[in-house]
Amino acid sequence: HFSFFPGQPRWRNRRLTYGFLPENNLPDTVKLTFANAFNRWAEVTPLTFVQTEFYYNANIKIAFFSGDHGDGEPFDGVLGTLAHAFSPPNGRFHLDGSEDWMVDGDVSTSTLRSAVDLESVAVHEIGHLLGLGHSSVEESIMYPTIASRKKKVDLTVDDIQGVQVLY
Ligand code: TQI
Ligand code: ZN
Ligand code: ZN
């Protein structure tokens, strides 16, 4: 079953902007992966997600960092913590730059056993950004474990019911 953060925080506006840390210089394939992940949630809510070039003014700020990056939750290198996102209306969405991120159409990392599917992690973290906690339903996107290399991007009834309580 789905859960929320204490106090059930949620966004008050339906149009949310997201931006990428300029220094990360992300390729279009990676940006498209995030756009696809946002779309999965947009399809089942009244929310729309719009990319903005103005990272510092965006509602949701997406950045890849390695190790200590100044928010008290340092990343730990390969595997372990992959990413973290904060509850509304914080909007910080950080990913561990030390992972071997797997992106559709990118063959360079596909043979590494530690590779982690970027879209799967993004769909999960966006759930947190929107106000969802973890779910006890094993098939759900918000269940707190995922096999590395596995692709898990389809929202389940549990995820949809949870997010529709908020929006
Ligand atoms: N990051 C944890 C997560 O997103 C961070 C975390 C732990 C957390 N407890 C939390 C965030 C409570 C919000 C509320 O769950 S992670 C998975 C999964 C991680 C884990 O790097 O361990 C995914 C990131 F679900 F597979 F375990 C993405 Cl998909
Ligand atoms: Zn962080
Ligand atoms: Zn989680």
Image (tube, helix red, strand yellow):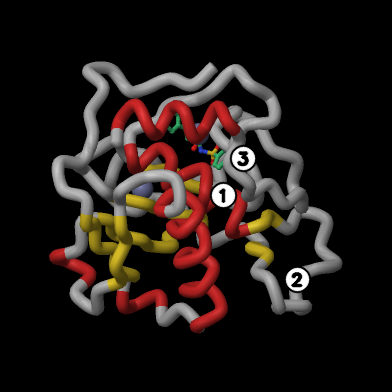
Mark 3 sits near ligand 1, with its Cβ under 8 Å away: yes
- Residue 112: horizontal and vertical position, in percent? 81, 63
Quarter placement of the C terminus: top left
* CA gap, disc 3 and disc 2: 18 Å
* 82 to the left or right of 72: right
Q: Amino acid at mark 3?
A: Gly
Could you say which disc has been placed on residue 80 in the image?
Answer: 3
Quarter placement of the N terminus: top right
The residue closer to the viewer here, 133 or 167, is 167
* CA gap, disc 1 and disc 2: 16 Å
User: Which of the 4 image quadrants contains residue 107?
Assistant: bottom right
Q: Secondary structure at mark 2?
A: loop
| Residue at position x 21%, y 57% in the image | 15
Q: Nearer the viewer, mark 1 or mark 2?
A: 1
Q: Nearer the viewer, mark 3 or mark 1?
A: 1
Badge 3 crowding class, 10 Å Cα cut-off, few under 14, some 14 to 19, many 20 or more, is few
Residue, disc 2: 109
Question: Considering only vertical position in the picture, is 1 above or below 153?
Answer: above
User: Which of the 4 image quadrants contains residue 158?
Assistant: top right
Badge 2 crowding class, 10 Å Cα cut-off, few under 14, some 14 to 19, many 20 or more, is some
* 34 to the left or right of 106: left
| Residue at position x 64%, y 51% in the image | 78
Q: Earlier in the sequence, mark 3 or mark 2?
A: 3
- Residue 12: horizontal and vertical position, in percent? 15, 41
Could you say which disc has been placed on residue 121 in the image?
Answer: 1
Q: Secondary structure at mark 3?
A: loop
Are dots 1 and 2 in contact, CB under 8 Å? no
Q: Nearer the viewer, mark 3 or mark 2?
A: 2
Question: Considering only vertical position in the picture, is 17 above or below 134?
Answer: below
